[in-house]
Amino acid sequence: MKRLIIALALLVLPLALLAGDFETASQAYAQGRYREAARLYERLAAREDVSADVYYNLGGCYYQLKDVGRALLNYERARLISPRDADLAYNLEAAKSLRRDNLPENQPWGGFSLNEALWSLTLVNLGLAAVLMLRLYRKPEWSAYVLIVALVLELCCGAGLAFKFWQALSDERAVILDSEVTALAGPQPGDTALFKLHAGSSVAIRASENGWSLIEAGSQQGWLAPGTWERIRRQNAKKTSPVATTALDQAD
Amino acid sequence: MRKRLNILILLCVLLPGLGRAASLSLSLERDTASLGEGLQLSVRLEGGRATSEPRIAGLDAFRVNRAGRSSSTQIVGGRLSSATEFYYYLEPLRPGHYALGPARLGNLVSNTVGLRVSDAAEQSAGPPLQPREPLSLTAGLNKTSCYEGERLDYVLRLATRMRVSDLNVSLPPQLDLRQEGEPRQSERDGQTIFELRYSFKPKRPGRYRIAPAAMNLRAYVQTDPFFAAARPVSLRSQGLELTVKPLPVPPAAFSGQVGTYTVKAALQPERLKPGEAATYSLVISGAGNLPELKPAAVPGLKFYPDKPVEQAGAKTLNFAVVAERPGLYRLSCPALSYFDPASGTYKRLSPALQTLTVVGTASASPVKPAPRAAPRPEVQPAEDILPIHVFARKPLAAAPALYLLLLALTAYLLLALLRRFSFSRPREPKPLKAFKFSLKQDSSRARALEALLAYFKAVLGVSVTSSAELTAELERRGLPPQLSAEIAARLDELNQAVYTGQGAAPVEPGLARLLGRLDRELK
């Protein structure tokens, strides 16, 4: 019994800590301590399986701190998890209107998220398995129709999941974080300056070399120094974004 | 006889023609061209058969596209002449004087032709080219002198008397051109004019030479009354010159806008009660990027902006104005400092003041904007986004292990179901097998009689009930009389047992063996 209580406590403790951090961060935000709130939300965002609300609130913090780049980055990340959130869509548009560059955007279709697609397929699969099991022993007439519907749904959900998976893998979008960056003709600091980009601009990463990245902004291409941008699709969720932490520390 | 005469006449006609010497000639559409301009080269073989393509010397400085071949046969004055022509389209890559040819085909060698290729820039520096028939490309700017940051229009016009397709435009690389609207098409003096409009803003002062724009297309040349041949054509516009003047020293409040603007303000209605909404409109029109204005904050009034509407060179900004308490309010917006290139001076854009009269008593209920106005305010930097979420919804975690488990289960069930399913009809058991199975299930004489009759029906194809009928049938089929008698006796025995109430007694052994013999005999 004692062991069971300890095991349950160990299971519940991280959730409780998570909820506590979120609440503390939200209180800091409500009291106008946006920098502190952002630091707490960044800590939460560094974990696995981040809630869309964490990114949403983090975006709000950066918006209040007038850091358009990071606000947009976090709103876009929240949209990957919760694509139909009306509040998020509104705030995202608000943050976009503060951008200085007017670049055409390649916005991926966001009707549903990858996890939603996976869960839909799992549920349909469960139904299909149940109908198949029934038909192994009994064959009522209605089960044939249910089986056909389940198979069609399975195909649709499978196609949806494959599409979202492909979309997630091919998402090369990134957001400019620095207030102004210069795209160069090559991946060296002394190369010719081609054009300038400002915080919040959405670009596509095309190649990388020595830490520098070849980006595509509208119809232009140029190389950007490392640390001036961040990918929307998170590649390593284990640690806090070093760029974000540095920016908050510098602001202090 | 008649057939032989026809062959003789044909040989008489053909032989003189075939006996003529073959010749090869090379010709060029014209002897001058500019860089990027296409021209046609043709190689003509007369009096011979072309088994392969000719090899042409001197084409290193050209991009060569094959454009097909044509053959013709003529009988003139009883003489047959045949010719094959090979067509090529050349695009010069470097300026210079070139000698094209000779072309070689087997032992035949053609003449050479000269071509002068001039640099396109040489032409662009001079006056604009006259539209050359039947295709021409011209570029133009709405101004040759402007201020930095001023919006300019760059217009590209293709005039053609031919049918064209697959238009592909290469714009001057140094301009950051933005297309304005869709390409327009019009007819003028029998020509079709395609017009492409772009805008750009020069960022630095200086004198610029704008490189020519290039256009690749396919032009359809009518080769005969019925057919048209598509030919790839490359066109270049003339180069342009532009002088960009620097802006004078700007005032402190300069917004960075360069253009000619006017603004009009309107308020409707001008008189209302607390809690009611009026519409404050700002219409900004002019050339250049139209700025956005916001009304100045007025204590006691709340502004809710609509989405800006931009069309036909005017931007309309509507704001729902809600009064919280009675009073006389003056509505205006902060002046926008801009540079007017027409006058060459800095100006301030400020609409006329509008007066709003609010009469009556303030309502106790919270003020709400008019339903027509957008309920959510337009973006106010760092102010008016929607509040944060105070509760973190648990994310829908991915569970690939669960899914794989379920997938495996479904696949297993599907396979199990498919194993049970068969497209072929179940095979009937063999009569003897069925008889033995029946005896195994129930060895009573009544059951044995039933099974025996079923066996006879299956094997002989007729229903037999008595031993006499059975014997007759077996003899008819030529079976040994001893075997027939034995089987008939067993049938009699079973019949008797059933009709004398001994049907439940077990059947005597050896019946199945007897039927096995019958099976073999029947085979």
Image (tube, rainbow, N blue to C red):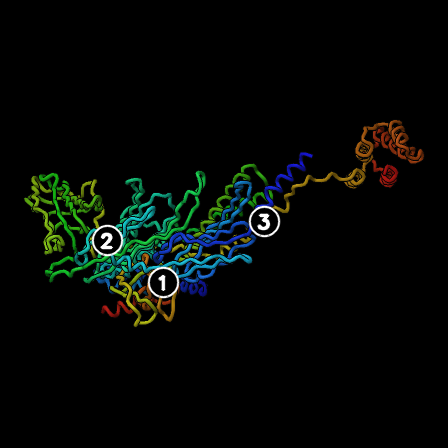
Relative depth, front residue between B192 and A239: B192
The location of residue A64, given as percent across then percent down, is 22, 59
**Residue that label 3 marks:** B19
Q: Are marks 3 and 1 on the same chain?
A: yes
**Mark 2, mark 1: which one is toward the viewer?**
1
Left or right, A38 with respect to B145, comes to right
Mark sitting on residue B385: 2
Residue at the extreme left of the image, as rendered: B328
Considering only vertical position in the picture, is B279 above or below B45? above
**Mark 2, mark 3: which one is toward the viewer?**
3
Left or right, A61 with respect to B413, comes to left
Alpha-carbon span between mark 3 and mark 1:
42 Å
Considering only vertical position in the picture, is B494 above or below B228? above
Mark sitting on residue A143: none
Callout 1 secondary element? strand
Left or right, A237 with respect to B453, comes to left
**Residue that label 1 marks:** B96
Callout 2 secondary element? loop
Q: Name the kind of residue labelled 2 in the image.
A: Ile
